[in-house]
Amino acid sequence: MKVKTEQEIFDFLKPIADGMGIEIVEVEFKQGREPTLTIYVDTEEGIDLNTCADFHTAIDSPLDEFDPSFGAPYTLQVSSPGLDRPLKTARDFEKRMGQKVEVKLYAPLQGKKFFEAVLVGYDGNCVTLAQGEESFKLELSKIAKICLAIEFD
């Protein structure tokens, strides 16, 4: 099935999202038996079901005209990115600065492949992490996954 690129879909929907105070976090088009276009969204205040529903309604007709699947049927979903979503973009890292993150490495560092630390810096190639009084830089290429640490009270 031929589809427009995720970047084309993002660029098309961004003005609608901006007008509603919504940030498009990611666009994902999964093909297969039941093709699905999922738009992950967030706001400064966080995301709720009503915001997802409102955005879905706002983009449904414009997407029909934009025709991202060139006439083939697909399911449209609007969703929260979730608390455990990996940090990927500069904006993701900026928003999580000063917060505790979970880091999973491709290869062990000082005998560990998984640890928690506070995100204190990001320069596009490396993150700076703090554990207690110590801080260290880690190249993004060595990180399999980095996401916000979820703590339960």
Image (cartoon, rainbow, N blue to C red):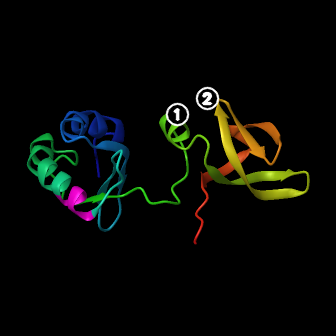
Residue farthest along the top direction in this orientation = 123
Q: Residue at x 58, y 71 (%)?
A: 152
Q: Which residue is mark 2?
A: 124
What type is the residue that disc 1 sits on?
A: Ala
**Main SS of the magenta segment?**
helix
Residue situated in front as seen by the camera: 52 or 10: 52
| Left or right for 68, reference 113 | left
Q: CA distance from mark 2 to mark 1?
A: 7 Å
Dot 1 alpha-carbon crowd within 10 angstroms: few under 14, some 14 to 19, many 20 or more: few
- The x and y percentages for residue 151 are 60, 66
Q: Which residue is mark 1?
A: 90
Residue 84 drawn in magenta: no
Mark 2–mark 1 CB contact (< 8 Å) = yes
Q: Secondary structure at mark 1?
A: helix
Against 49, residue 19 (above or below) is above
- Of the numbered discs 2 and 1, the one sitting upstream in the chain is 1
For the magenta stretch, what is the residue range?
49-53
Dot 2 alpha-carbon crowd within 10 angstroms: few under 14, some 14 to 19, many 20 or more: few
Q: Residue at x 80, y 57 (%)?
A: 113
- The x and y percentages for residue 48 are 29, 61
What type is the residue that disc 2 sits on?
A: Gly
| Left or right for 21, reference 140 | left
